[in-house]
Amino acid sequence: MTNATHVQSADWVRTIESGEGYVVPQPEMFRQMLRSMPAYGFYRALSRHVRDGDTVAEAGCGWATSSFVLAERGIHVTAIDIAEQLITGLRGLQSRLGGKIASHLHLIAGDILKAPTVTGCDVVFSDGTYEHFHETETRKLFLQNMHLMLRENGIHAVSVPNLCNPMFRFVADFKMPTMHTFTLRSLAAELEAGGFTVLETGYSFVNPGFSQWLKSPWMRYPMQLFAAAFPYFPRFLQHVCAVHIWCVTRKT
């Protein structure tokens, strides 16, 4: 890895440890977030490709909301993040929520740019991770590791923020380290160049943890109303309004 990559990883850990992002919520608030996941477009797309009995991994998990919901469904999931403090907090949540979440979810503090310790997965996904790697070579390394984690013909799903949406400048408080900008076309092209065949693409509005990144708490309510209507928008309007863009691919 380059020095720049080490700096980007350190910036991410610093954001977590300073309390500026992904502060682990209380169990009831987290439970509410999990209940709202079926309305999140990327999760709906991901779940269509996860079958009973599959082995799944999340690369750069943040709050790992998709992993928690999949585990509750009875899927064996491994969620990986470089921030040890975050993983420790998530393990506490996992213990308190119990049930299949406790038995089917494995939380690991690890660097997804190093040689993978998890292999043979049917599905590997990342939600809000890939954009944090500014350098093309670093993203190539990430995709190589996703290849190593997946079985033959395994599914790789990626969601990134749609930074082309001007709304980000007005509502988002950029406490996060800087991010690489993708269009849906450039994201799909980069994944294809990395050895994946694109199966489907799409748009999402906000994910369940969006409120932590808003400039002001009052913005949460109009955003929630807009999010409820977003799935019914025609695709061209989703393209304009999307907060997240995603691709589901197959390892080739």
Image (cartoon, rainbow, N blue to C red):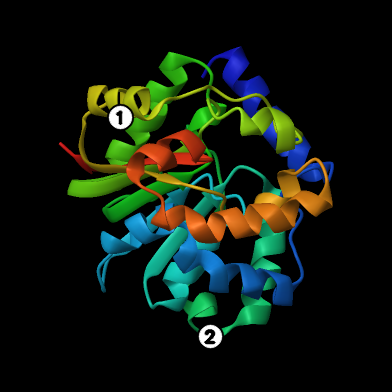
Residue drawn at (72%, 44%) of the image? 213
- Disc 1 is placed on an element classified as helix
* Residue labelled with disc 1: 188
Left or right of 170: which side holds 56?
left
Residue 99, which numbered label? Answer: 2
Q: Earlier in the sequence, mark 2 or mark 1?
A: 2
Question: The residue under label 1 is which amino acid type?
Answer: Ala
Front-lying residue, 26 or 223: 223
Image coordinates for residue 54, horizontal then vertical, percent: 27, 66
Front-lying residue, 20 or 124: 20
Question: The residue under label 2 is which amino acid type?
Answer: Gly
Q: Is residue 59 above or below residue 106?
A: above
Residue 97, which numbered label? Answer: none
Left or right of 197: which side holds 57?
right
Q: Is residue 193 above or below residue 157?
A: above
Q: Residues within 10 Å of mark 2 (few under 14, many from 20)?
A: few
Left or right of 31: which side holds 144?
left
Image coordinates for residue 2, horizontal then vertical, percent: 55, 14
- Disc 2 is placed on an element classified as helix
Cα separation, mark 2 vs mark 1, equals 37 Å
Image coordinates for residue 73, horizontal then vertical, percent: 40, 77
